[in-house]
Image: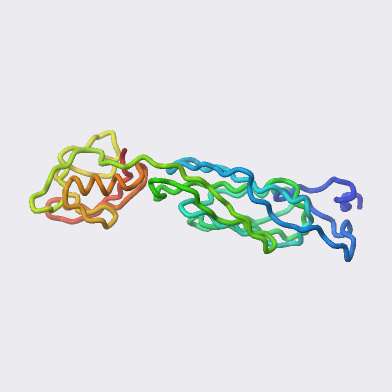
């Protein structure tokens, strides 16, 4: 029975940055202190592309009933991992396929005593200029911001040389650097590039402008004309 009087003895099972709180340790009818998640003290700087970085939500040192944590990723980011530090029982973590959200379910009463960590990575479709973007962390009806800074990116460029097509018909590939992404994407000499992500390409200048408005490392769909046949290539933009 001593193992059950967790709060009284200060010994407990570690879960989700929380400890298992024995029901008997809470006085019936007692008024609980205000319980709320606290915004992180630091905001991570994310490169796009770049590795995921952790965001820690400080504990409130309060007892919580069974419930669910809901996390919404900031725009242009994805949740790669959530660490609720569970030990001794299951607290399922569900992350959306696109990383845009996550939920964590707690089936028992807990005392939140350790940070709760969310890992975020920036998407390569983030604006070239970067900026501050905000998501949310919700627990027991209280929502606090989940903020990140996405760093400015490097403008993209084509991994080879192109020339004009008469009549504004696109940009003709004259050379593809075998060591760059353009070669890996399958571009061949004499291909005519006609659009980038649906944006028409009428000349080398418009191709350069379309790629320079996106981050190097972003993947785009490029329409080309090869031997009078139209096709699309997936291109991870060079720099």
Rendering coords of residue 191 (x, y %): 16, 47
Residue, x 22% and y 38% (percent of image)?
160
> Is residue 86 toward the left or the right of residue 235 in the image?
right
Q: Taking the image as drawn, is residue 88 in sight?
A: no
Residue, x 53% and y 58% (percent of image)?
96
Vertical arrangement, residue 17 with respect to residue 23, above or below: above
Vertical arrangement, residue 200 with respect to residue 141, above or below: above
> Is residue 43 toward the left or the right of residue 115 in the image?
left
Res 183 quadrant in image? top left
Residue, x 75% and y 47% (percent of image)?
113
Q: Taking the image as drawn, is residue 74 in sight?
A: yes
Q: Residue furthest top?
A: 179
Rendering coords of residue 173 (x, y %): 17, 43
Residue, x 28% and y 41% (percent of image)?
157
> Is residue 66 toward the left or the right of residue 187 in the image?
right
Front-lying residue, 39 or 172: 39
Scheme of image coloration: rainbow
Quick one: quadrant of the C terminus?
Answer: top left
Front-lying residue, 103 or 149: 149
Rendering coords of residue 64 (x, y %): 76, 58
Q: Which residue lies furthest to the left in this view?
A: 166
Rendering coords of residue 204 (x, y %): 18, 45
Vertical arrangement, residue 217 with respect to residue 73, above or below: above
Q: Residue furthest right?
A: 1
Front-lying residue, 44 or 20: 44
Total marks in image? 0
């Amino acid at each position: 029975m001593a193992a059950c009087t967790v709060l009284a003895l200060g010994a407990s099972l570690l879960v989700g940055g929380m400890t298992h709180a024995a029901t008997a340790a809470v006085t019936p009818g007692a008024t609980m202190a205000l319980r709320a998640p606290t915004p992180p003290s630091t905001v991570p700087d994310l490169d796009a592309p770049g590795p995921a970085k952790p965001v820690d939500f400080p504990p409130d040192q309060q007892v919580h009933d069974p419930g669910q944590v809901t996390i919404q990723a900031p725009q242009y980011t994805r949740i790669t991992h959530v660490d609720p530090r569970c030990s001794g029982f299951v607290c399922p973590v569900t992350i959306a396929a696109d990383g845009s959200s996550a939920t964590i379910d707690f089936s028992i009463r807990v005392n939140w005593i350790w940070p709760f960590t969310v890992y975020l990575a920036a998407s390569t479709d983030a604006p070239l200029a970067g900026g501050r973007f905000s998501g949310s962390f919700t627990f027991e009806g209280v929502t606090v911001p989940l903020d990140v800074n996405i760093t400015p990116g490097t403008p993209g460029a084509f991994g080879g040389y192109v020339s004009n097509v008469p009549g504004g018909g696109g940009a003709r590939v004259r050379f593809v650097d075998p060591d760059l992404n353009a070669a890996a994407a399958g571009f061949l000499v004499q291909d005519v590039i006609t659009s980038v992500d649906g944006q028409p390409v009428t000349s080398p200048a418009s191709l350069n402008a379309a790629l320079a408005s996106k981050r190097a490392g972003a993947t785009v769909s490029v329409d080309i004309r090869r031997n009078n046949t139209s096709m699309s290539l997936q291109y991870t933009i060079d720099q």
